[in-house]
Image (cartoon, rainbow, N blue to C red):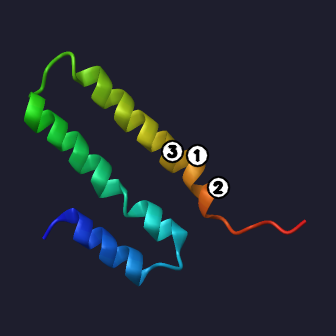
């Protein structure tokens, strides 16, 4: 079973919760990083890209995800 099928099941099951939808993307980022290492090997030219890729994803989880998943503010 591919990851895309699991992602579809999660999106259908928890369609009302945006937070679960965004958390479901975490394995995709980790698997894509693993695929880069598998295809290209652990090269010194690839390490800075992987470090920046993971750092940006962590910052996105920490900063933008809570803001994106909170309810609308009525003013």
Count all numbered tags in the image, as a single digit.
3
Q: Quadrant of residue 24?
A: bottom left
Q: Is residue 19 left or right of residue 54?
A: right
Tell me where residue 59 appears, x and y as whole percent. 50, 40
Residue ID at (14%, 34%): 37
> Which secondary structure lies at badge 3?
helix
Residue 19 numbered mark, or none: none
Q: Residues within 10 Å of mark 2 (few under 14, many from 20)?
A: few
- Per the model, the C-alpha gap separating discs 1 and 3 is 5 Å
Residue 60 numbered mark, or none: 3
Mark 2–mark 1 contact, CB under 8 Å? yes
The quadrant in which the N terminus is found is: bottom left
Tell me where residue 52 appears, x and y as whole percent. 38, 28
- Per the model, the C-alpha gap separating discs 2 and 1 is 7 Å
Q: Is residue 23 left or right of residue 66?
A: left
Q: Is residue 26 above or below residue 6?
A: above
- Per the model, the C-alpha gap separating discs 2 and 3 is 10 Å
Residue that numbered label 1 is attached to: 63
Residue ID at (74%, 67%): 72
> Which secondary structure lies at badge 1?
helix
Residue at the extreme bottom of the image, as rendered: 13
Q: Quadrant of residue 53?
A: top left
Mark 1–mark 3 contact, CB under 8 Å? yes
> Camera-side residue: 2 or 45?
2
Which badge, 2 or 3, comes first in the chain's sequence?
3
Residue 67 numbered mark, or none: 2
Tell me where residue 63 appears, x and y as whole percent. 58, 46
Q: Residues within 10 Å of mark 3 (few under 14, many from 20)?
A: few
């Amino acid at each position: 079973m591919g990851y895309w099928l699991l992602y579809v099941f999660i999106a259908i099951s928890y369609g009302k919760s945006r937070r679960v939808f965004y958390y479901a993307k975490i394995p995709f980022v980790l698997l894509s990083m693993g695929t880069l290492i598998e295809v290209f090997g652990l090269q010194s030219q690839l390490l800075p890209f992987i470090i920046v890729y993971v750092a940006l994803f962590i910052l996105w989880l920490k900063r933008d995800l809570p803001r994106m998943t909170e309810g609308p503010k009525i003013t």
